[in-house]
Image (cartoon, rainbow, N blue to C red):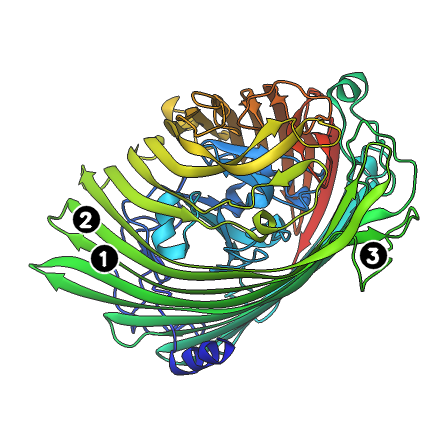
Amino acid sequence: MRSAILIVAALIATQNIYAQQHWLLDSTRTRKDTIVLREVEVTEHRDSPFLITRVSDIEAGAIYAAKKTERIKLDNVIANLATNNSRQTFATVAGLNIWESDAAGLQLGIGGRGLNPNRTSNFTTRQNGYDISADPLGYPESYYVPPMMALERIDIVRGAGALRYGTQFGGVVNFVMKDGSHDSPLAAEASLTAGSFGFAGAFARLGGTTNSTNYVAMYQFRRADGWRPNSEFNQHLAYAALTTNVSTHARLRVDYTFMTYLAQQPGGLTDQMFLSDPAQSVRARNWFSVHWNLASLTFDWFISERTSLRSMIFGNLSSRQALGNLNRIQTADLGGPRTMIDGTFQNIGNETTLQHDVEVGGLPWSLLAGVRVFHGTTKQQQGDASASDGPDFEFLHPDRLEGSSHTFPNDNIAGFAEALISLTPQLRLVPGFRAEHITTRAEGYYALRVVDFAGNVIIDSSVSEQQSRSRTIMLFGIGLSYQIDTGAVEIYANATQNYRSITFSDLRINNPNLVIDPDITDERGYTLDLGIRGRIGSVFNWDASAFYLRYNDKIGEVLLDDKAPLYLPYRYRTNIADAYTMGIEALTEIDVSTVLGISSSLPDVHWIVNASLTQGRYLAANDLAVGGNTVEYVPSYVFRTGINVRHQSLRFSFLWSAIGQQYTDATNASYTASAVSGSVPAYNVADITLGYSFHIFTINASCNNVFGAKYFTRRADSYPGPGIIPAEPRSFYVSVTGSL
């Protein structure tokens, strides 16, 4: 498989960066960092007056027309970026359910439409177009989060993105890093941040353009003591990229990312502990360590004015170690060996896309086809580790682990194609398909240990096992776009099939709070979107849509209590039943200054409203009494509203977020003694950021959770819990940035 990847990579050059349809690059331009491309009709100003924007119809080897898309331009975000504050950063994305697992954004947890937010595992997560998760199909959890201070933009495509980017129900989140300066051979910036609970951060970036080469390098350091005992962390992150024009029709780009962090985890709380004192910690020996290495090589070849090719080789060589006490949180930690879960990830892949533009009857058509080849090997081990208090990530008996030791090879070959067909100047059709072949294997052993009521060990042995699952999936989709009033208003619709593979964690994990169904199978379903979006001049901008998301054999968790010998309640992960979620998502932005006729010499004020109403239900189940129950992680409403104010060198933002109640398992349990299952009560929280620039310096001050709300967003069945993970209380941060 690896040889095949290298052959494909050697034979295929690359695909269209085609930049956005916003670009107009022709032979009259002489900047040394550009190359000669076809002329492209400008359909929208690159510098939009609005904060709410969407991805262009055709861009970077993908067709986004007729899909539900959102784009976040980080230069427009007035937020506490030093701590990767997700509420503020994703404020203009409709209906997102955000988990707050740590106070510094070390891990990003976003979901929507009833999809589990855990480490954003129900989205395909990418950086500069390539995978950054542990394994996109076998273990799609993202332990690495790009630093918001280093990003140019974040692009989000909902479920219809499955045809181009992979089979996830959620779609794709793509983080695009900033290039170096295009106007200078050397430009630099540095930032220092200090905040509550011992937070300290430093960020530095430099880059520029020399002849036909653009380069950028950045480094970030962050540390804090944490607002709860036993919650200190430190993180180092570095990134470098080089882009060079190898000819007037070809471009080569290489980048590398390194990230490492060590975090002490204070553990979860029971409901009673949370009500009594959410700042307490009853776990002092839990630690989490991550080491991430990503690299990519991208070659863009603009074959002609109408044809372009992109080939991207990417790799991931990373690991993560979790260490601590996983017993129920109401049980005191009396010392003794801790449980360690050690995972290593080695991935390599190639994606190549070919785009060709034609005219049919005087109307533009775009045809896109591509192939993906991927091989990944994940090794996961679980066993007893040191009984000390510190981060001693070593197994006590590495040759005979008390938990399990498995290698999970994963092979994936996919072909995909989409077309943008203009039936009339206003009406466009976007059909597409994806053919995917997946082979998931598990090779290793797990410990079999049986204890009687008196605590005596009856059986203590290991069981070797080999599993292999191969499947070929065909997904189809079709979109429709109709433009009104010369493109100012668009009606769009989309129907796309979705698929989600079982993960390595579904095949084997030992957790006293969770049991896995050995016969668990993949999920299938589809997504429907119908919406209208547009703008009225520079005054009003909106995107309102309805969606229906159908799951067949939805994987989820129910609460059972029939496990010998203690018959305590535990979570059981299985294919629960068919289910659906449906709802309405709406984003609006009003330029208040223009509406009120305020003089341009006064502040520019934009008001944003982001609202969604969602319902999710399980249909009749086979032998689980959950028919008619609410799907977990479906808050009935998500509402965010705020204002952004800009006046000369002054910037100000206020954001208020309100999230409805949600359940954490299909049983819809409101309360359990272990706190692993139960409801997440409705909550609301507010954030304020103020910035001022003078000369080469910018000062930003943020207050997060302004009103000191006591709330939580998740219940964890393992790390960083188990139990309730309280959200951070009121906190303050100040950053000083200098640019040259």
Q: Position of residue 52 (x, y in %)?
A: 42, 38
- Please report contact status of discs 3 and 2: CB closer than 8 Å, yes or no: no
Pointer 1: what residue? Answer: 419
Q: Earlier in the sequence, mark 3 or mark 2?
A: 3
Pointer 3: what residue? Answer: 393
- Mark 1: which secondary structure? strand
Q: Which mark is residue 76?
A: none
- Please report contact status of discs 2 and 1: CB closer than 8 Å, yes or no: yes
- Mark 3: which secondary structure? loop
Pointer 2: what residue? Answer: 429
**Tag nearer the camera, 3 or 2:** 3
Q: CA distance from mark 2 to mark 1?
A: 8 Å
Q: Nearer the viewer, residue 534 or 420?
A: 420
Q: CA distance from mark 3 to mark 1?
A: 50 Å
**Residue at 91% in and 46% down:** 389
Q: Earlier in the sequence, mark 3 or mark 1?
A: 3
Q: Quadrant of the C terminus?
A: bottom right
Amino acid found under the numbered disc labelled 2: Leu
Amino acid found under the numbered disc labelled 3: Phe
Q: Is residue 221 visible?
A: no
Q: Determine crowd level at label 2: few under 14, some 14-19, many 20+ residues with C-alpha closer than 10 A.
A: many
Q: Position of residue 499 (x, y in %)?
A: 40, 48
Residue 215 figure quarter: bottom right
Q: Nearer the viewer, residue 130 or 135?
A: 135
**Residue at 49% in and 27% down:** 624
Q: Is residue 132 visible?
A: yes
Q: Position of residue 148 (x, y in %)?
A: 60, 48
